[in-house]
Image (cartoon, rainbow, N blue to C red):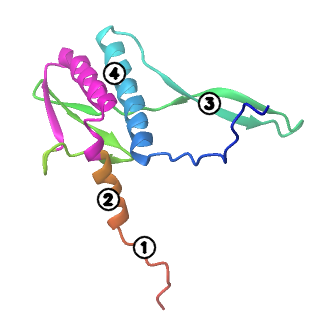
Amino acid sequence: MSSLKAIARPEIVKSPVLAKRMKLIERLEEQLAMVNAKLANQPFSAFKQKTIKDPVSGEKTTTQVPRKIRPWYFENNQHYYLEIKLAGKVLELQPNMPTIDVGAFAELPNVFQILISATEKGELDDYLRSSDEEESKKTPKDTTKKN
């Protein structure tokens, strides 16, 4: 025991940008799976875990419940476009230009792979930080009642 060095527990700092990056990667992978299923003419379904309490016994069980995922891509005159969405907001890769021009539907998997790779490398961190700044600039809603 005398050979071990004891120290105070170091504080672990979690980066909010890292958490957003991981969430964005997860969402991009869901979108990619949806596109791949459509290209293969397969049905796509996503699930989430839900804990349900039995009213009689009080026992809790975890089940999978279907979850609706809306596509981030859309079509106009047989040309496809993509908007990256995070926390209900569209990320603007350039000012006032949130939409990515994809072209053919078959190109969507390649675009998603590029976006996943860029997110993993941290290339979208500036956009994730800017969404943090926008949230902090919002003024809290006035909750006082007016008579």
Disc 3 from disc 2: Cα separation: 32 Å
Residue at 26% across, 46% down: 127
Q: Amino acid at mark 3?
A: Gln
Disc 2 from disc 1: Cα separation: 17 Å
* Location of mark 3 (residue): 49
- Compared to residue 131, the image places residue 38 above or below, namely above
- Magenta span of residues: 98-127
Q: Name which of mark 4 and mark 1 comes first in the sequence.
A: 4
State if disc 2 and disc 4 touch (CB < 8 Å).
Answer: no
* Location of mark 4 (residue): 32
Outermost residue, front side: 2
* Location of mark 1 (residue): 141
Q: Is residue 40 magenta?
A: no
* Location of mark 2 (residue): 133
- Compared to residue 28, the image places residue 42 above or below, namely above
Disc 4 from disc 1: Cα separation: 37 Å
Q: Give the dominant element type of the magenta stretch: helix, strand or loop.
A: helix
Left or right, 11 with reference to 104: right
Q: Name which of mark 1 and mark 3 comes first in the sequence.
A: 3
Q: Amino acid at mark 2?
A: Glu
Mark 1 secondary-structure assignment:
loop
Residue at 30% across, 42% down: 125
State if disc 4 and disc 3 touch (CB < 8 Å).
Answer: no
